[in-house]
Image: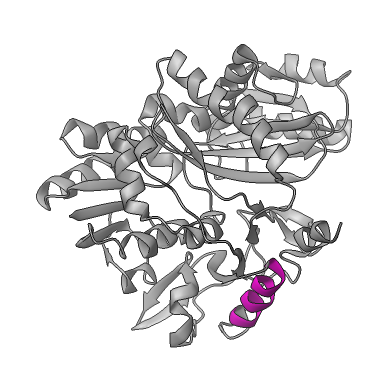
Amino acid sequence: MKVMVVGGGGREHAIVKKIIGSPKVDMVYVLPGNSGIARDAVTVSIAATDIPAIVNFAKDNDIDYAIVAPDDPLVLGCVDALNEIGIPCFGPDAKAAIIEGSKVFSKDLMKKYGIPTAAYETFNDMEKALEYLETAPIPTVIKADGLALGKGVIIAMTREEAVDAVRSMMEDKKFGKSGDNIVIEEFLEGPEVSVLSFTDGKTIVPMISSMDHKRVGDGDTGLNTGGMGTVAPNPYYTAEVAERCMKEIFVPTMEAMNAEGRTFKGCLYFGLMITADGPKVIEYNCRFGDPETQVVLPLLKTDLFEIMQAVTAGTLSEVEVEWLDASACCVIGASNGYPVSYEKGFEISIPEDLWNNTYIAGAKSHEGKLVTSGGRVLGVTAVEPTLAEAVEKAYEMIGRIEFDNKYTRSDIGARALKALEK
C-alpha cells in the first residue's frame, strides 16, 4: 500500500520508522517531513496545514491510506477532506479533534459527563476574568482556549502573574485568536502521567504510560518546552491507577464523545495528574504526543499499521495489542537557548549505528549535510530491560551525536528512577 504521513517532526519520524516494517506498507510519503526522515521515506515539500495541496497530492499519487499526525491539520479538517475523496485515514475528523482544539469544549465535556478534572471557570471577557482573579485561589492555571503550539498554558504562582497571563492572552493576543476565550482552573498537585490510547469509538486500548520532562532545565526548572525527554513506562502509573483511569476517565471520555455526536477514531492522548483524590485529566490531545511517541512506539510489538487500519475500520477489538516487557528513555538534543532564541545551521554528526534509534525533528539538508534548523533538533531512544539501563544507554548514545550548540538535560528519568526506589 502507498501510505501518506502528514507532519514533519520527531513524532512523525517515530511513526514512519514503525510502519515501514509492516508487510502491508510498500511506500511511505511524508508531507513535509524533514531531511532526517528522508532516510526512511520519501519527503514532499507540502506544509502539514496546506489541506488542498495535501488532497491533490493524495489524488495524484494514488495514496491508499493517510496518517494525519499533528494537531493543526486535524483541527483544520484534513481527515475530513481526505475522507471526502475516498482515502481512509488514521486520525480524528474535525468534529472530534475539537477535544484538543478547544480547552473550553474539553473542560465542559468533562463537567457534563463527570470525568475527573480540575475545577475551572471560562471567560471571553477580560474584565470579568480579572475580576474573578481578585478572589480566586492562588496558584492557579491560565489556559488559552485554542491551539498554541503547546505553549498556551501558564501556571501563575502569584496573583500578579495570573493578571499578567490573562492580559497577555486576551489583550496582547500572545497566542492570537486562541486567547479570545480562556480557562482559569484549579492548580493540581501530584505526579504527571501521559497515556496515549488507540480508539475506534467502540474500544479503547491504552498504550504504555510515559513521563514527559517539559521544563528546559535540570530539576524541572526554567521555561516550559515541547519536551526535553521522556521515559516509559511511568512508575506512578500503577495497575491500580490504570484500572481507575480506564473506569473513570478513558471509557467515559470515549462514550462522552459518542454521545455528543463526535465519535473519536485515532490516537486520544490523556495528560493526567495523580492527585491525592485520584487521577484527574489535565488535558486531552487529539493525536500522538511528542516526544512521548518516541518512547511508546519502540515498545510496541504489534504491527502499528495493522492497529491503525483496525481503528479506521472500527475493528480494534479484534486486534491483540502487545508490548515489550522493557523500558525506554528518550533524550532530546536541543539548540542551546531553546525555547527562547538560539543559533542554527550547525552540521549534525550521527554515527551510522545510531540512526535506528534517532528521531529527527529540527534539522534540514544544506549543501549535502544535515544541519540544525530548530529548537528541538532530535531525540535518541534506548530500549533496555530496565529503566536504569535505558537511561544510561540513551545518554551514552546522545553523547556520540555531535553538533555545535547542543544542549541536553542531564536528568531525564531521574524522577522515575527515584520513584522506583520507593
Residue at x 32%, y 52% (from the top left corner): 305
The picture quadrant where one finds residue 193 is top right
**Secondary structure mostly seen in the magenta stretch:** helix
- Tell me where the magenta segment starts and ends, as one range: 387-397
Query: Can residue 43 be found in the magenta stretch?
Result: no
Looking at the image, is 40 positioned above or below residue 183? below
- Pinpoint residue 284: horizontal percent, then vertical percent: 57, 34
Q: Is residue 314 left or right of residue 61?
A: right
Colouring scheme, one of rainbow, by chain, secondary structure, one colour: one colour
Q: Is residue 389 magenta?
A: yes
Q: Residue at x 37, y 78 (%)?
A: 366
Question: In x, y percent, where is residue 296?
Answer: 53, 56
Q: How far across and how far down the image is residue 54, in percent?
A: 24, 46
In the image, residue 384 lies at what x, y percent?
Answer: 60, 72
Q: Is residue 172 visible?
A: no
Which quarter of the rendering shows the C terminus? bottom right
Residue toward you, 295 or 24: 24
Residue at 30% over, 64% down? 20
Total labels drawn:
0
Q: Is residue 2 above or below residue 257?
A: below
Residue 91 to residue 250: above or below: below
- Return the residue nearer the eye: 50 or 86: 86
Q: Nearer the viewer, residue 374 or 278?
A: 278
**Residue 339 falls in which quadrant of the image?**
bottom right
Identify the residue shown where x is 33% and y is 32%. Answer: 77
Question: Could you say which quadrant of the image residue 411 lies in?
Answer: bottom right
Pick the residue in front: 60 or 382.
382
Q: Quadrant of the N terminus?
A: bottom left
> Is residue 77 found left or right of 152 in the rendered image?
left
Q: Is residue 327 visible?
A: yes
Q: Is residue 307 above or below residue 360?
A: above
